[in-house]
Image (cartoon, rainbow, N blue to C red):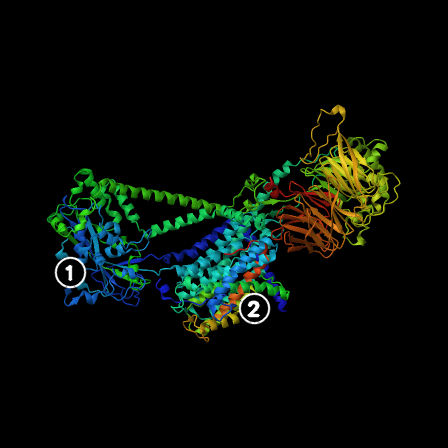
Amino acid sequence: MNEIQEERLRQNISAAFYRHGLLCASYPVPIILFTSASILTCCYPLLKLPLPGTGPVEFTTGVRDYSTPSHESQGDLSERPDWYRGPPVAYIQQVLVKAAVSPWDNSLVPVDVFRSPLGRVFSVLEEIRNHVYTDRSLEALCLQVTDLLPGLRRMQAVLPEHGCLLVSPGNYWQNRRDLFDADPDLLKTVHQHEPKGLHTSATLKDLLFGVPGKQTGVNLYSKKRVVTYTITIALSSYDARFVASLRARLKQLHPSANCTLREDHMVHVHFKEEIGIAELIPLVTTYIILFAYIYFSTRKIDMVKSKWGLALAAVVTVLSSLLMSVGLCTLFGLTPTLNGGEIFPYLVVVIGLENVLVLTKSVVSTPVDLEVKLRIAQGLSNESWSIMKNMATELCIILIGYFTFVPAIQEFCLFAVVGLVSDFFLQMFFFTTVLSIDIRRMELADLNRRLPAEAGMPPPKPGPLRPRETPPPPRPSPHTITLQAPAFRNLRLPKRLRVVYFLARTRLAQRIIMVGTVIWIGILVYTDPAGLRTFLAAQVSEQSPLGEAGLPPHLGVAPVFPGGDPTSTLSGLPAPEPTPLPENQSQGHRAAHPEVAPVSSPQITWGPEDEELWRRLSFRHWPSLFSYYNITLAKRYISILPVIPVTLHLSPQEAIDTRHPQDTHHAPPPSIKTSDLQTDLTLYKVAALGLFAGVVLVLLLFCLYRVLCPRNYGQNGVPHGRRRRGDLPCDEYGYSPPISEISPLLLRGHSMDIECLASDGMLLASCCLVGHIRVWDAQTGDCLTVIPNNGLRRSSSSGCWEHRDGWDHISACEAESLLGADFREPGGGAVGGQDVDIFPIRRRTTPARPALFGDQPDLTPLIDTNFGLSPPSQALSSSGFDFGGLVEKAYQEHEPSPTLAFPPSPPPVLPPELPPQNNGDWDSSVWAMELRGNLIATGRSSGKLELWDAVEGSLRCSNEDGVSGITALAFLNNRIVAARLNGSLDFFTVEITKPLGLLQYRGPPGRGSLPPSPCYSSEDVISCQLTRSVQCAHQKPITVLKAAAGRVVTGSQDHTVRVYRLEDSCCLFTLQGHSGGITAIYIDQTMVLASGGQDGTICVWDVLTGSRVSHVYGHRGDVTSLVCTTSCIISSGLDDLICIWDRSTGIKLYSIQQEVGCGASLGVISESLLVTGGQGCVSFWDLNYGDLLQTVYLGQSSEGQSVRQLLVLDNAAIVCDFGSELSLVYVPSVLEKLD
Amino acid sequence: MPRLEEHCWSCSCSASVKTQELSSARWVVCKTAEMMSIITSVLSHAYGSLHSLQSANLIRRGLVLFIVGVVLALVLNLLQIQRNVTLFPEEVLDTLFSSAWWIPLCCGTAAAVVGLLYPCLDQHLGEPHKFKREWASVMRCIAVFVGINHASAKLDFANNVQLSLTLAALSLGLWWTFDRSRSGFGLGLTTAFLATLIAQLLVYNGIYQYTSPDFLYVRSWLPCIFFSGGVTVGNIGRQLAIGSTEKPHND
């Protein structure tokens, strides 16, 4: 009962998902719009949350009605920030002192600019310290500090160690006038505490002077000759009357004329928690893990149009679901108290990308010929149950977490639940829709690509003389294949090179530099140590044509300009310049009186910018000052009281009096030029910095673009076409896999199963059981030549085979007569053409098939021929018909087939006893075939070796020296090696003698002329001489013969492998090591020799020394084929396993289980692509991972014959036999890579 | 920054002090580290001359695991230091990276041993681990492990029992989500037991101490952390053993 209910639930869920998938795929655009709108709506509450960051926050209140805020939050004052509660850490009272020696005269030295003004700080300090207002002294009110941090020993001499926190420039000299007077070099004292290099936090000079370093005026080249510094007092409690009396007292003592600084605002500055390195490292680690997780997840997305697009969509899905969850929680009044940055990675991990990947996988694995809508729907409904189950499980786990009753975990769970739900929502709506769009795009692209390809195909010509028959069958639905970069396991490269390649490939150094620069600029802008912002503001205002009229707005307060102030004339001072900005002022002077400028008296001006001079300090100024006393300002605030201005005018005499004897030794002030240059340089620096930042930004964006958009975006693999052949495999590391389509091209013409296949890259020769040889163009699949079975009969019989054009006609006659016979056959069926299959030979084609079906006619190979489509009589009467198939039937009908007695096992292993030859030689069958240049060498069961011209189809020469059947042939350069059934090995030399009359004329080279293979023109007389015959090469029949790199390797049933030298046919080694007959041998140009035997072992040999390199036990049963790549050995066995071994160590990397009976055929297309034959299909595997990339079905009937032979051509096409047909499969992506 | 100056040191609460020989820990560890480096160099030499890729593979896996252990130990140590969970006496250890150097080394060694032991055990028992064998899952596992550590260090629980129970549940959840094999569970338990024992002995000998021990000398959640650490490292080790032919991906 329960199960039924569950089943019903499953069905309901699946049906619901199906409908939903249909909906999403039908209306993609409205649904994406809807989803985006809902995401934005849900994220809207996030605007209220404060932005993350550690910058301080300010809040301004009036001074008059100030009272210390209470600890309880007051609901009525909504404009108050929530940190504004309780007393501040400290009240900061700054006394801003501006001092100048006035009037200036030429007798003064540069040091006088600041020595006496600085000296006055001690008297002002004294005044402040001793100020008492109604028995309240500073000692009672100020912030008492105890100890400096132990780590700051060098600061001990400078910062106050106990008592009031009162800092001023006087601290440099321990607040003692006598030390100051005795100091020979003030500047050195000031600068000795400055850190070297770039600094981002507050320096000691900033702390003590209380103004930015540039504005102090304490240097030798000051133009203004005004020294500015502050005395900073930290008060622990606020006494308005005391502060007011101090202010009044100081103002009275040192009146600041024309000073209109506002005194009614108090600024409260709240500091966030600072993140130190120690806290940052775990955070960064979690983020690294998060990115690794995302990377490894999205790497699995495959077989889609835009991998990056989908990966991006997946990440967007997860991120926006998180944002939605935070937004929704905020909306319902749950303010996040957790540190968002910390829990974020965990949330992503909990929510996960798995569902998205499962969805993608499920959708792409649906049948490709369905409509997109249906595919989406089907994919969704397939995975609906698992998705729902996962979701329920996760919700349960989170629910359990909720009941731990730990507030933090509860909050996390709440977020996770909302995040999960919104993630589900987004997956269902957003991601599914994106996926449908992607798949639709892929289909469109497939369609586009297929159209030109079909247009390029030559139309099937119905001409009667053309042996090529039926048009290519309707192509099966498009498949895609994704090629992985092959270099992942390229272990042979030296380590050093690999490191270099890695650096070059990832452009690591470049990127690190770029990131570093960006971070540096960010820090620069954030902390503003150089006063960039203010400098820029000043520059802008200076250049503004309105002069002072353009100035006021940027400072934000409504200032009263001193110049316009009539009260300023009341003071005894000369009226200040109307322009308040110092730079401006000096420039104005210089412009007016360039020669008088050095002697012009300094002016002390008070502008609105002096009101809040602390703003120009680093934002870490106050936290670092307090941190020296182990007081943290994190999550607390300080209140900054309005500044008290103090103006000091000193007479030149006073300045001279306070001079230190050494002061006069200082250099005279340099010319104004240098300082001018200085400002200019700063300007240039700023400009250069800006330019650099811009360039970096552009580069960064470009990189981002490159990262986000695949390189072959929209133009499938075109850039790869330019790849050179010699490129190192490492270069293809970042190679984005092109998506391409594979469709087989069926070559028809043989009436019986294909027996032998040979190719030299351009031409392809095939031989069927009957003995017909057909030559095809390996590029286009056109049939070039047909060599009928009995080449000898041509000379002996009527001569109707003299030229190709003739025999089709004759064959028609013969076919007609044959048809009559066909109809007499009992199982023949209605269509005469199918009778061919009555022959028992047919049984051989499918050895895996149970015997009881063997006697049934297998009609599949002829179903698609034209004969099957129209009645035979009609077909024969139409002159434009193709008679190729019938012709061959005619032969079979007329002569008793020589292959009748073939046992149902592969011929080389168990050679059959031939029936008595009644009709000469022509009924012997072809057992071995090789193709080089345009010569086809065939070895017949009668022991005869024949050489045919591949283009013309004529017999060029034959050799009948041996009588035992030729089981294997090797054709290398001009030598042919034939292995015979009796174990002997014959070496032939092909000699070309040109006819005398034609010596000058070199015929056009044959179309298949590859450089190493000889080219024979039709005029040449070719002879084939037996040079040497090794009679007892092996004790038992030779089963395998391979030749490469000047060596001939034979494997026999006598358990040995022999290596011969090709030139002198000398036996070099006899390799013993197998305990069974040899069944497979691999040798290539690099002298790698591997052999596999009936005992299931695979041996790797060193061809040079004859020693065994490694020996592995691989298969249960025969090793049926062996292929090596540079790094691994691939073997297949009778146990239907394909094993991949590491070549150097002999460790089995992995194995692939094949279908029953089709493990024998293998081929390696490139270093990373393996192709295997299966039941009516070929499969492509990624060698690096062992993943099945794709299966290409050769025909419509899925249960067709198995592929027994498979040949990989140079142009990355593969040829395999498919019953009586050949199948040419192109792997276009590999093609692009090779070219 | 002020916190860093306080010379508070945490014990390695990661996959840590597990299988290393105890007693005079510092000296032994120093020697073993030397031995390790010597062995590594010798073996890497041997790798070049001999064709024993198998042992090279083993060493490579061990190295990767060692690095993972070291990095995790450093990071998680920092987490614990921030919360002043463990204390190291000032006279024994001065600064994090100069004096507590043996913690990451121990963790690394332990991680290598455990990570190599897991696939080895799988092979011996004859039940290869098939559950969720992919790097994405491994990354998820590491993230959850770091999260458990984070929780142990940063969350404020009402009492220690609650904290320990929560972490135990989390560790079991980790095992269920990413492992689900009996051998993994057993090895995790063994690891947790041994490592806790070692930690107890280390504390007993005064190498370091916990701020508020509630389980003899250590914190009661320590076994949970060790258990999940063992499972995590085992997960990495298995993945490395499977994907040892391809490039080992480390963060």
Of all residues shown, which one is farthest toward the bottom?
Answer: B216
Residue A464: image location, x then y, percent: 76, 33
Give the chain of mark 2: B
> Which of these two is toward me, A440 or A1064?
A1064
Give the chain of mark 1: A
- Left/right of residue A206 with respect to residue A750 in the rendered view: left
| Disc 2 residue type (three-letter) | Leu
User: What residue is at 64 percent from the left and 36 percent from the top?
Assistant: A456
Residue B20 got which mark? none
- Left/right of residue A904 with respect to residue A216 in the rendered view: right
> Which of these two is toward me, A84 or B8?
B8
Q: Based on the displayed image, in which of its 4 quarters is residue A870 positioned? A: top right
> Which of these two is toward me, A701 or A993?
A993
Residue A1128: image location, x then y, percent: 64, 50
Label 1, residues with CA under 10 Å away: few <14, some 14-19, many ≥20 = some
Q: Give the quarter of the figure containing the N terminus of chain B.
A: bottom left
The residue wearing badge 2 is: B187
- Left/right of residue A509 with respect to residue A1159 in the rendered view: left
Q: Is residue A111 above or below residue A330?
A: above
The residue wearing badge 1 is: A127
| Disc 1 residue type (three-letter) | Glu
User: What residue is at 34 percent from the left and 50 percent from the top?
Assistant: A525
> Which of these two is toward me, A1074 or A455?
A1074
The number of numbered badges drawn on the structure is 2
Q: What element carries label 2?
A: helix
The alpha-carbon separation of the residues under discs 2 and 1 comes to 76 Å
Residue A232: image location, x then y, percent: 22, 59
Residue A893, can we see it? yes
Label 2, residues with CA under 10 Å away: few <14, some 14-19, many ≥20 = some
Q: Is residue A588 above or below residue A346?
A: above
Q: Do the residues labelled 2 and 1 touch (CB within 8 Å)?
A: no
